[in-house]
Image: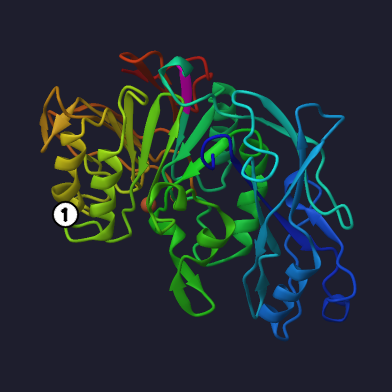
Amino acid sequence: MAGPGAMAVSWVTHPEEDDALALRAGVEVAATIAQDGAWEGHRTLSKHHPQRTCEALARQVNSLVRYGTAPARLASAAEGNRTCYASDDYSSGTLHTVLLGVGEGGPLAPNTQYFYMVGDSDGAQSEALSFTTPPLTGPESLPYRLGLIGDLGQTENSAQTLEHLTASDAASVINVGDLSYADGYQPRWDSYMRLAAPHTQRVAWALVEGNHEEEMFDGEEGWVAYERRFWFPSAQCGSNTPFYYSYEVAGAHVVMLGSYAAYLEDSEQFAWLRRDLASVDRSRTPWLIAVMHAPWYNSNEKHQHEVDDMAAAMEPVLYEFGADVVFAGHVHAYERSYRSFRGERNECGPMYINIGDGGNREGLNGFLDPQPKWSTMREPSYGHGSLLLQNTTHALWQWHRNQDAVRVTADEG
Ligand SMILES: [Fe+2]
């Protein structure tokens, strides 16, 4: 979701042949599209001047999306931007992003199914895909279902979580971070994108960074893959960084907070959060949802007290502005709190839900005893969540475990 009536579409094109690439660059570039399932695996670019080759390739293809409301007639087209990154033994391919609904054709119609093809008609194009645009922002657009997933990775458990999430039929998805677990081995980003693409190409996904998005690349620690592969609506909400931003959908204002950007009272993020929350019109978006990677409420054996200073700074802000629910991950298990504030049950505080149970290769984490008074439900099982915003006063949270059929609810509140 890229603002009112706008959607961002991202994809990757890879060179068809690599051995002769240095010679071919600048002459012709054939590409296959990662999203259509036809792409056959990671190819390595020339070892000579790889960044230059990667950039030369990016100049040879267009970032084009054709789209429309009938699959047989994609009457509109939009162009966008592309980038790439490379080291001596890896190239990302060309990473494209196109914003639909912001150009001459005007905004996309709300709550409407659009069909689209990505790619360059001179090279290769995807098949016709489709997504449904969000409804107009406002309480009249409720009910609305959000899907929640975290710490996904790319194991068989991850694949099952994705299948169950898609079966939940959420209108859009929030991923609370730790995506590919590439951990510096870049081809894992390619395999992760192939795993996720059948799910991300049909509904909008909003991402927040996890610690695994910071990784070594070409001898330096950074966020290269995360920043270049994904698009964030930061400029639309007065944030100048992909690490924290907000967006509105249906009757919800969603604040994505950065656990790995400065967050104390003297930080830019803190000032932005206060500004952003002060601008929220609760008659328009009655639901206020906050999302971050590292949890403030956590009784798991893992990741205790990692962000106590973030909670000390920001928890009073979310409380003051009446946040309804706060999602996090990082811990590989499920946990839900009662409404809480400052470590105690408090009916005016938000509910805290840790949903880092997507299924990555690190496995599940157990809990400390005794269970704190603020914690109402906790379990080390893989799964995903679904938040149905029913009307302006009632919402239904459901946690679905992978070992259950998707219609079974393991926790509800
Ligand atoms: Fe994490």
**Left/right of residue 126 with respect to residue 297 in the rendered view:** right
Whether residue 145 appears in magenta in the rendering, the answer is yes
Looking at the image, which residue sits at the far front? Answer: 104
- Whole-percent x and y of residue 30? 87, 62
- As shown in the figure, which amino acid type bears the numbered disc 1? Asp
The image's colouring method is: rainbow
Q: Residue at x 89, y 57 (%)?
A: 122
- Whole-percent x and y of residue 45? 75, 74
Magenta: main secondary structure equals strand
Is 168 located above or below residue 291 in the figure? above
Q: Tell me where the magenta segment starts and ends, as one range.
A: 142-146
- Whole-percent x and y of residue 189? 60, 57
Q: Quadrant of the N terminus?
A: top right
Residue 97 seen from this side: yes
Quarter assignment of residue 395 = top left
Query: Under tag 1, what secondary structure?
Result: helix
What residue does disc 1 label? Answer: 309
Q: Residue at x 74, y 51 (%)?
A: 34
Residue 383 seen from this side: no
Q: Quadrant of the C terminus?
A: top left
**Left/right of residue 224 with respect to residue 266 in the rendered view:** right
Label 1 residue near ligand 1, CB within 8 Å = no
- Whole-percent x and y of residue 114? 71, 30
Number of numbered discs: 1
For the residue pair 246 and 163, the one nearer the viewer reads as: 246
User: How many neighbours does mark 1 have within 10 angstroms: few (below 14), some (14-19), or many (20 or more)?
Assistant: some
For the residue pair 250 and 52, the one nearer the viewer reads as: 250
Q: Residue at x 26, y 51 (%)?
A: 303
